[in-house]
Image (tube, coloured by chain):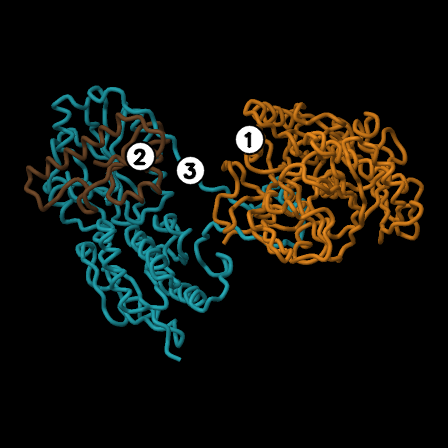
Chain colours: A brown, B orange, C cyan
Amino acid sequence: MVKEVERAGIPVVHICTVVPISLTVGANRIVPAIAIPYPLGNPALDKKDEKTLRRKIVEKSLQALTTEVEGQTVFED
Amino acid sequence: MRLELGNIFIKDVQFSDATKIENGVLYIDKEELLATVGGDERVKNIDVELAHPGEEVRITPVKDVIEPRVKVEGPGGMFPGVLSKVDTVGTGRTHALKNVAVVTAGKIVGFQEGIIDMSGPGAEYTPFSKLHNIVIIADPVDGIKQYDHEAAVRMIGLKAAQYLGEFAKNLEPEEIKYYETEPLLESIKKYPDLPRVGYVYMLQTQGLLHDTYVYGVDAKKIIPTILYPTEIFDGAIISGNCVSACDKNPTYVHQNNSIIEDLYEKHGKEYNFVGVIITNENVYLADKERSSNWTAKLCKYLGLDAVIVSQEGFGNPDTDLIMNCKKIENEGVKTVIVTDEYAGRDGASQSLADADPKADAVITNGNANEVILLPPMKKIIGTTQYVDTIAGGFDGSLRADGSIEVEIQAITGATNETGFVRLTAKEY
Amino acid sequence: MSKKRVVHYINQFFAGIGGEEKADIKPEVREGVVGPGMAINTALKEEAEIVATVICGDSYFNENVEVAQKEILDMIKQYKPDLFIAGPAFNAGRYGVACGTITKAVQDELGIPVVTGMYIENPGADMFKKSVYIVETGNSAATMRAAVPAMVNLALKLLKGEEVGSPEEDKYISRGIRKNYFAEERGSKRAVDMLIKKLKGEDFVTEYPMPDFDRVEPNPAVKDLSKAKIALVTSGGIVPKGNPDRVESSSASKYGKYDIANFQELTEADHETAHGGYDPVYANEDPDRVLPVDVLRDLEKEGAIGELHRYFYTTVGNGTSVASSKAFASEFAKELIADGVEAVILTST
């Protein structure tokens, strides 16, 4: 789906835990997620901290969307 | 154009006191041959040796392989613009001496020349192990420039082939083949319902030992143009290149172009084989763009439905190949491309330097990087001094016992990209 | 002659331990066969036997690759195997990646013959086909009966040092290794034959498939986020509570388009996940963990982004075919463009 959205002309960032898969499927902007059942969460944390964590990932994604990239790029910490 | 090609089958070649062809044997007066091809002040010594199929003989470094042919009727002579005048060839009658070839060898010009083994595993990989080879070893004078060396040896080879070909002029061929290509509008009238096909013939044109000549013109300098297929049978295109040995088109391959042969087989039945478009493979991006644009334009202009495209060489010409393929397909003309591969010694690397999904019909003539062990041979014609440095060789290729571990890249004609041979590759 | 020793690797599901909720279990090893190992063992007959089975949760493996790999390799080494078999993973993405990873690690570290099996669209296939032999299986465990003999056949060939045939013969995913051979006819004749077929629109087989270059050029970055309309898309299967459109939990045949204009966040009360391929508990508790509506609303209020698009698109990435996913996305991408969406955040589980 990522490639089709990109192909349509919309910049897209893929938040995904298994980054190698994201690379194989051809996403250009990739942000690693926390875990498979909760990519943007962590049930071990309290609600407030979890939301902070989620915000961090979303902000990184927005950063990816505003960064020019040449090819596939993983936006790590 | 209509050409009658008379084939005279030779079963042996021997030195004798006079050059003649009798009972299928080509007798050669060595002195006369040397006198005919000699006299070039760029050359220090020339000698001639014979190599027969099955002998334990290795010929190296090989530059060109040429078939002796002669014009019997019709305008022009062999190798127009080079040895003969520039008259347009391809019509009338031509005779060819089959099962023999002139091979030029001798001190290396650059590191691209090749190896021909007349027996053993190496012989399987070169079509020229099946011929009686008249090998001319020409050594240049000291201090000569490489371009002069190459030019001198090239002319010697062609002259030898011309000299020997003359002796076929008055013979009765055992077999005559007819090849006919009408001018475009006439052929369309003749075959109104058949699809139109063409042959896009890519010629290597990248400098020393990488050049090709059309009617004597350096093909680096041409823009894509049209030839009747039969012009090529009469030596309109000659080789000035041997890079790498496995996938260069020796003059012999131009003269006997098997894509043209096989296209003629079904001409007038499955399709109308309209003609040949020649194009080059230059070293500048602008030239690549211009030539591929032009080639695609000509394909469309001629109203072709499909073409076969053959490449010569590898590496940056892979880009020319893919450009031609893409642009021709974009004109609505279907393509089949004929190439070879450089997939690494383990076969796991990407075979071509360039690629495109439109290249969906590919004929491959094998992976040139596959390594072979050539056994020692009883006799070397030429010298094995350069084996380590020729393309396909490496440090330690030549072993003390005379055996050679080398990529098939170094074997003349091994992966020829006009589909001249049966070697191919598949995926595991 | 004693039988050759085999170690088998499977995941928590095939070990009968549990489904998604147990995908986080750490590696453990059991003597003898477990689950599909029984069928494999039977097929191995007198040649070899499975002496131990290593089990690991798919999520644990993928989220802790380094550690998991080392733990598992240590377990395997203990058994001094002559052969290693992983899977088959069919179309389970994480399982396929785990199988590929551990199979390659065993090959590299122990230098013994290795084999795994999975469906051709499994992401693990593209990732590892060049490194290890991957038997091509069907896309679900319903094809186990065909997968086992194929895997055992290839495994035994490798074990005995016999020459491996072509991908068609020995039923493995082509590794892209080119090998020369002499054809019956010369290349020019084959070229003319292929030309005639192509002209007639008949089927032909190219002798060199072009490498798969389906890469899409990245689009230019968003210039001004504060004015941009951002849309959310997910393969994590987030849907309104009750899954009104019945998006399937696996092999989704459809995607959903849902309105979040009135939502400042997603909760257990209003949304859930339809995805059957991961432990749904956390996503059901708080769907924002998969589709971060709450954070994006905050950013919207703060003016960091222009607007969160009112619709989000969702499907279930579990076993849904590449072709289907492509089709869904190319359809809804058109709508996104029509709606003036400038960028997409796509989340996956």
Residue B387: x and y in percent read 63, 47
Dot 3 crowding, Cα within 10 Å, few <14, some 14–19, many 20+: few
> Residue tagged by mark 2?
A73
**Answer yes or no: do the residues labelled 3 and 2 have beta carbons within 8 Å?**
no
- Locate the C terminus of chain A by quadrant: top left
Distance between the Cα atoms at labels 1 and 2?
29 Å
In this figure, which residue is indicated by the disc labeled 3? Answer: C214
Could you say where residue B14 lies in the image, as x and y percent from the top left? 86, 51
Image coordinates for residue C253, horizontal then vertical, percent:
31, 45
Q: Are marks 3 and 1 in contact (CB under 8 Å)?
A: no
Q: Nearer the viewer, mark 1 or mark 2?
A: 2
Q: Which mark is residue C189?
A: none
Number of on-image labels = 3
Tell me the kind of residue under disc 1.
Met
Q: Is residue B84 left or right of residue C84?
A: right
Between B238 and C193, the one lying in front of the other is: B238
At horizontal 34% and vertical 64% (from top left) the residue drawn is C84
Marker disc for residue B323: 1
Under tag 2, what secondary structure? strand
